[in-house]
Amino acid sequence: MLLYACSEKYADDKEKSQKQNLFSEISFVANQTLNIVEYNSDDYINYLNPYEEAGIITHNSMVKAVKIVVEKKSDPNSVNDEFLKLLYEKLPNDLLKLNSDNLDPFEIQIEEILFDIIINEGFNPYIAKSIFIEKIILDADCLHDNQKKRILVFSTVLRYLVVGMTDINLEYVNSKGDWKDCFVQKLEDLQNCDNCYLEKVWCIFTWPQCLGFKALDCAIDVIVN
């Protein structure tokens, strides 16, 4: 019994140490200064991410939802319903409703790092750094498959929402900063919210209603106003 307890403690300590090292590695990437240029249509694709389709379909659904609302001159608030309808038609259920098994506070820490990159550095640095971070997550031995999946889906969806808002902005209004300021503010509000751990967890599991709605609210607001 004692030997088993010692072995279990050793395993726990080893996993904790591995996660600390993983966090340090991700933080190192996040804190790097990169010489970022404007991205073309291939630069924001991470071909190694097995859940990249979640981001691609999110981008396409977002752009199409805005187009439907604008062309039909519908109530701007209906854009969220259009977005969800398109997502549910295209995305597998396991990507829309992520499994909650083995949820770890470490995942919230990664979410906060991703938000920090956008808030403090902007969209192009996020596109570049999120791809590097996803590669690190893929190679991590200390994360369960469900943990990797949630982080990878969250990261790629956030990346493609940024690209989607950029495309919508160029298509309809070609403004310089309103939608960017709006989206950054929404992420910053969630990031800095006190006692909002459950809301941050909810944002991972229900990313269409969390990240998707935040992005669409900003995109459609610029067009309408």
Image (spheres, rainbow, N blue to C red):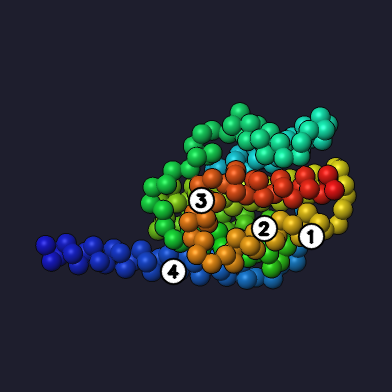
Query: Which element carries disc 1, helix, strand or loop?
Result: loop
Lateral position of residue 73 relative to residue 57, left or right: right
Q: CA distance from mark 3 to mark 2?
A: 15 Å
Crowdedness near tag 3: few (<14), some (14–19) or many (≥20) residues, C-alpha within 10 Å: few
Residues marked 1 and 2 touching at CB (< 8 Å): no
> Residue at point 76% right, 60% down?
181
Type of the residue with mark 1: Val
Q: Which residue is mark 4?
A: 20
Secondary structure found at label 3: helix
Quarter occupied by the N terminus = bottom left
- Dot 4 or dot 1, earlier in sequence: 4
Q: Does 138 sit left or right of 76 as displayed? A: left
Residue where numbered disc 2 is placed: 186
Which residue, given by chain and number where applicable, does mark 1 sit on?
37
Q: Quadrant of residue 52?
A: top right
Q: Are marks 3 and 2 in contact (CB under 8 Å)?
A: no
Circles 4, 3 touching at the beta carbon (< 8 Å) = no
Mark closest to the chain's N terminus, 4 or 2: 4
| Residue for badge 3 | 202
Q: CA distance from mark 3 to mark 1?
A: 33 Å
Instruction: Confirm or deny contact between disc 3 and disc 1 (CB under 8 A).
Output: no
- Which marked residue is nearer to the observer: mark 4 or mark 1? 4
Q: Amino acid at mark 4?
A: Gln
Task: List x then y, in percent, for residue 125.
Answer: 70, 62
Q: Which residue is pictured at 48% across the width and 43% down the height?
A: 98
